[in-house]
């Protein structure tokens, strides 16, 4: 399959280049951005020399569709919404890594300070949490957000089984700095992040509505959750710590069985008997999940860790590429995390 990437110079776009270079059924034929047009990607990023020496070209949907079989939109939110219409009109496959096609237009406008895509365009996209799967024949996939992926995978077995009090879920999620994107801001400046710990967008993070939207498929009573996000002084990784009161006490064996039943055939979800650590997933498409139950408070604490640039972005996009074209779900992935 010949593929193109729009937004190649962002963190997710660069991660996609590395992943796709190892995929036996994917050939990267063109890369696109709004800056550094005409320059070879490996000239700007020498670590990609011999991996991707393609020149960056301007974004032209007609040219992309003439050269490729699928396009990945690895652009910031607010950009993909302006690019998707010609691809949808031509029924040309799209995997969008931004938030622009995950939510109804009115919900998007509330949570993102940007104009939404047309609702008839959004309606063509399916929400692509890979472990839930995508309908056969899907042509347009809205890749989940990074915080959303970690949180949804932590909560999905519990919500599906109906064992938790959905009105009192608390999520405390933490991300490495790459989750904030490449654009430098006051809050992401080195001197403000290094040796610091900052909570931001408390109850306002744009991934909240997509988490609620996905989980409400399995229990319509779930319409909100308490959600905090913080920046860690590290490059990459997300840890979502979820506090969920149980409706009735359960043994740890029963809880483990719920997760095992939900994820037994999912190659990238690993259940841990100890509490997960970020180092164990960095550089991989794995999501590690562990838990501890407090019988005194009847609260289950679930910890979910992912690499935000891989399982939370480019890796899940490639996983969805595999699902879209009927390929083995784990094709093209390096199985061992970098760890250090």
Image: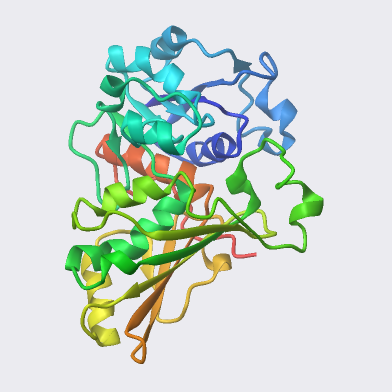
Q: Position of residue 260 (x, y in %)?
A: 26, 71
Q: Quadrant of the C terminus?
A: bottom right
Q: Quadrant of the N terminus?
A: top left
In the image, residue 141 lies at what x, y percent? 32, 33
For the point 32% across and 47% down, the residue is 129
Q: How is the image coloured?
A: rainbow
Residue 117: image quadrant is top left
In the image, is 122 to the left or to the right of 74? left
- Image position of 85 (left or right of 204): left
Q: Quadrant of residue 127?
A: top left
Looking at the picture, does residue 174 appear above or below residue 301?
A: above
- Residue 276 appears in the figure: yes
Residue 332 seen in the figure: no
Place of residue 236 in the rendered image (x, y in percent of width and height, measured from the top left):
61, 54
Q: Residue furthest bottom?
A: 296
Considering only vertical position in the picture, is 147 above or below 325? below
Q: Left or right of 146: which side holds 135?
A: left
Residue in the foreground of this view, choosing between 84 and 191: 191
Residue 175 is situated, as x and y percent measured from the top left of the image, at 57, 56
Instruction: Determine the residue positioned at 33% across, 55% down.
Output: 224
Q: Nearer the viewer, residue 316 or 146?
A: 146
Q: Is residue 254 above or below residue 16?
A: below
């Amino acid at each position: 399959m010949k593929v193109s990437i729009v937004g190649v110079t962002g963190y997710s776009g660069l991660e996609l280049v590395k992943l796709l270079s190892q995929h036996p059924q994917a050939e990267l034929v063109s890369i696109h951005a709004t800056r550094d047009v005409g320059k070879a990607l490996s000239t700007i990023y020498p670590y990609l020399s011999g991996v991707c020496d393609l020149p960056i070209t301007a974004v032209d949907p007609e040219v992309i569709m003439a050269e490729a079989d699928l396009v990945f939109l690895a652009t910031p939110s607010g950009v993909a919404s302006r690019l998707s219409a010609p691809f949808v009109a031509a029924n040309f496959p799209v995997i969008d890594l931004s938030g622009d096609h995950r939510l109804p237009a009115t919900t998007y406008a509330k949570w993102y300070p940007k104009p939404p895509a047309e609702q008839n365009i959004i309606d063509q996209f399916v929400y692509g949490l890979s472990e839930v799967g995508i309908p056969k024949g899907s042509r347009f996939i809205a890749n989940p957000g990074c915080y959303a992926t970690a949180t949804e995978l932590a909560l999905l077995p519990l919500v599906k089984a109906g064992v938790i009090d959905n009105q009192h879920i608390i999520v405390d999620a933490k991300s490495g700095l790459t989750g904030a994107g490449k654009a430098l801001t006051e809050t992401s400046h080195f001197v403000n992040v290094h040796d610091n710990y900052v909570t931001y967008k408390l109850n306002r993070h744009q991934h909240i509505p997509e988490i609620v939207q996905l989980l409400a498929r399995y229990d319509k009573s779930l319409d909100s959750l308490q959600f905090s996000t913080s920046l860690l002084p590290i490059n990459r990784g997300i840890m979502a710590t979820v506090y969920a009161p149980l409706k009735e006490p359960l043994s740890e064996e029963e809880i483990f069985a719920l997760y095992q039943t939900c994820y037994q055939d999912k190659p990238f979800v690993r259940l841990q008997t100890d509490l997960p650590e970020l180092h164990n997933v960095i550089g991989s498409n794995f999501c590690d999940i562990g838990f501890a139950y407090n019988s005194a408070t009847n609260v289950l604490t679930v910890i979910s860790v992912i690499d935000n640039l891989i399982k939370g972005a480019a890796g899940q996009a490639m996983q969805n590429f595999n699902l879209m074209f009927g390929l083995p779900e784990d094709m093209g992935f390096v199985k061992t995390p970098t760890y250090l």
